[in-house]
Image: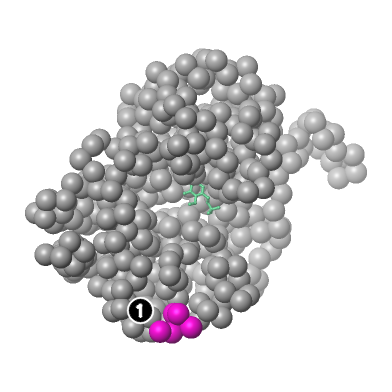
Amino acid sequence: QLDGMLASRMKHSFHLHEKAKEVIPGGVTANIKYFAPHPIIMQKGKGSHLVDVDGNEYIDYLLCYGALILGHGHPKVIEAVIQQMANDGTTVFGTPHELEMVMAQKIIHAFPSVEMVRYTNSGLEATLLAIRLAQAFTGKTAIAKFEGHYHGGYDQVLISVNPSIAEAGDEKEPKAVPESKGIPAQYTDETIILPFNNIEATETILRKQKHRLAAVILEPVQGGFIPADATFMKQLRAITKELGIVLIFDEVKTGFRIIYGGAQTVYGIDPDLTALGKVLGGGFPIGAVGGKKEMMEQMDPRRGKDALSIETEKANKTDTLFHSGTYNGHPTILAAGLATLDVLQQEGTMTKLLQMTSMLREGLENVYHAYGIPMKTVGLGSSFNIVLTEQEVKNYRDLAKANIKLREKIDYELLSLGVYAKPGNRYSVSVAHTQEDIARTIEAHEKAIRQVTNR
Ligand code: PMP
């Protein structure tokens, strides 16, 4: 619960949320944006900071769920967006245009496994398209995903993302638990759940299910913060290759965040398909799928047709994989994304970002340990999470054993102290975060710990 101090700082937020609730379920446009007793309504972003409708300022570690790697309103991004609209004379062509190719080249250059690219409007659509490509390629329909991994909110993958341990079954053979009302029962059969970072158990399940499995999809870094073990990753690649199962890396979160070139660059592993999003859009909605030519060319509309008669010929639906989207390859978004990637590629930018993140992680660990609170920061690259535990954190089951209640209490306290990490959420750091931000954040954690533990 919010204490009196926070409640008194949030009068406007409270009133706006009361009104919003009448016209928007829960007053939020995504369930995850809600927290009790009500979310904070923001009004302005500037660099590493957010300002709410009551004028309170926060150091932002949510960063739109990791998307804003340059922070809010980076001048190069704003300039690129305005320039694109002014120069092109339109907000969107609805036809092919040059930036689509320019960005595709940039992605191919950054991601070793990617030979061709298609765009979508979100990360969700990117994983959906990747899975369909795998199904078409293999002629199989079931997929396997890991417990605790999120790939978007549709039926096939909205399973065992955050299951109750009581329902989730044996750690080595997790049950498929739907995350929402309204998911047809067939999906808990067609989606096989695997235990992350446990290669023996994963291999056993994959061998048993290989005849049905089109793809294994995973977040190479679970939730953007629990890295796969290097040997786990290597063996998963080898097993999926041997069994003829398409390996999909969901790098929507990790793509340009861990390092430029994502988890596959860190691990030196080539997935068959990669889903991208978030940072790629420079703060605008985007997704992309990249992969090997033989798989991507399934979407080539010329497939199995005479090139000249393509428009008149009745499409043979079994030749080509359907992919569409009114706004795919949106020029304004690609301009914002390209500007973002340009800044990230500038000498020293990524190194500094990673140094800042390490500084913050180290400082936070010191504070918690000074107060005798079991805690570790778990992460890779510029995202991490605070996990209140002494145990190793390798997967969803380990996370579930941490002291989540205390973590949330501290997070609520932090809101009054000007640090915005949505209670319980992971931390993302941006290029805009300064040493002063880091120092203030560590100090705020110390105050929050003292407050919550009455010291
Ligand atoms: N995959 C991963 C790993 C994600 O983190 C997310 C978003 N949090 C998605 C897919 C879905 O992306 P979007 O919200 O853009 O649809």
Query: Whole-percent x and y of residue 356?
Result: 22, 57
Residue at the location (56% across, 77% down)?
A: 20
* 394 over 435 or under it: above or below: above
Query: Whole-percent x and y of residue 212?
Result: 63, 21
Q: Quadrant of residue 42?
A: bottom left
* Residue type, numbered disc 1: Ala
* 27 over 248 or under it: above or below: below
Q: Residues within 10 Å of mark 1 (few under 14, many from 20)?
A: some
Residue at the location (84% across, 41% down)?
A: 310
Predominant SS of the magenta segment:
helix
Query: Whole-percent x and y of residue 242?
Result: 51, 15
Range of residues picked out in magenta: 11-15
Residue at the location (31% across, 74% down)?
A: 3
Can residue 397 be seen by looking at this rendering? yes
- Residue nearer the viewer, 35 or 67: 35
Residue at the location (36% across, 61% down)?
A: 423
Q: Quadrant of residue 455?
A: bottom left
In the image, is residue 14 part of the stretch drawn in magenta? yes
- Residue nearer the viewer, 318 or 20: 20
- Residue nearer the viewer, 179 or 346: 179
* 126 over 191 or under it: above or below: below
- Quadrant where the image shows the N terminus: bottom left
Q: Quadrant of residue 437?
A: bottom left
Query: Whole-percent x and y of residue 383?
Result: 32, 51
Residue matched to label 1: 7
